[in-house]
């Protein structure tokens, strides 16, 4: 009986060591080793071209490396495997955003909201949408999107500043001043918020 237990323990130990030494792309991504994550993912895809999780991690990693076109290519390949995976859809929104494909980005982000209204990237998605609407000069829509982003991250001074800017651009100076004030309470050193606050307050007083 003792020999059996010894052999069983030896096999378990060997299995555990192999599992521990196997490269993990997601771990590398989470620790900021994006190039390593990409390398591991490519090896995984060479072995199994239908692993949707691998397409997700390699796309995430390439976005962090600023290689948006390449990330989009992998994300589209992943979309062909899993059409409604919100992680892939969100990545396509980001790659489109960074490449200036505004309408494509909005379409993908709206899809993400439809499929994952409380998904792990929902706050970022609404922020990106707000920035896209600012690009397009649709400041009321930007206000709505950025207000929702701030709902998910109420202490994000940078996002509050962008919300305030959208309101200022729409001529809603009173609410712009309020949002700038909230941003400055969180981060008094935020230059954009300070300058925006002064602009909006001056515009409000000129009415």
Image (spheres, helix red, strand yellow):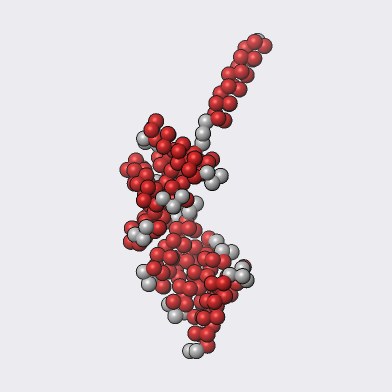
Residue 60 at x, y percent in the picture: 45, 47
| Residue 125 sits in quarter | bottom left
Residue 5 at x, y percent in the picture: 64, 15
Question: How many numbered discs sit on the rendered protein?
Answer: 0
| Residue 30 sits in quarter | top right
Residue pictured at 45% horizontal, 70% vertical: 143
| Placement of 84 over or under 97, stated as above or below | above
Residue pictured at 46% horizontal, 36% vertical: 40
Residue 1 at x, y percent in the picture: 65, 10
Q: 150 and 189: which one is in front? A: 189
Q: 150 and 21: which one is in front? A: 21
Residue 2 at x, y percent in the picture: 67, 11
Residue pictured at 43% horizontal, 65% vertical: 131
Taking the image as drawn, is residue 28 in sight?
yes
Taking the image as drawn, is residue 79 in sight?
no
Q: 99 and 51: which one is in front? A: 99
């Amino acid at each position: 009986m003792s020999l059996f237990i010894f052999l069983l323990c030896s096999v378990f130990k060997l299995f555990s060591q192999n599992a521990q030494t196997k490269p993990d792309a997601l771990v590398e991504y989470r620790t900021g080793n994006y190039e390593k994550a990409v390398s591991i993912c490519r090896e995984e895809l060479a072995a199994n071209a239908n692993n949707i999780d691998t397409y997700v991690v390699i796309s995430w990693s390439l976005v962090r490396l600023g290689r948006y076109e390449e990330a989009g290519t992998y994300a589209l390949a992943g979309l062909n495997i899993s059409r409604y995976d919100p992680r892939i859809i969100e990545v396509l929104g980001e790659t489109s955003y960074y490449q200036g494909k505004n309408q494509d980005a909005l379409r993908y982000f709206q899809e993400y909201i439809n499929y994952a209204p409380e998904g792990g990237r929902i706050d970022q998605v609404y922020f990106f949408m707000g920035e896209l609407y600012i690009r397009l000069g649709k400041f009321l829509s930007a206000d709505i999107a950025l207000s929702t982003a701030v709902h998910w991250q109420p202490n994000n001074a940078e996002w509050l500043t962008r919300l305030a800017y959208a309101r200022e651009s729409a001529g809603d100076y009173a609410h712009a001043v309020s949002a700038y004030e909230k941003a400055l309470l969180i981060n008094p050193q935020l230059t954009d918020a300070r300058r925006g606050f002064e602009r909006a307050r001056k515009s409000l007083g000129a009415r």
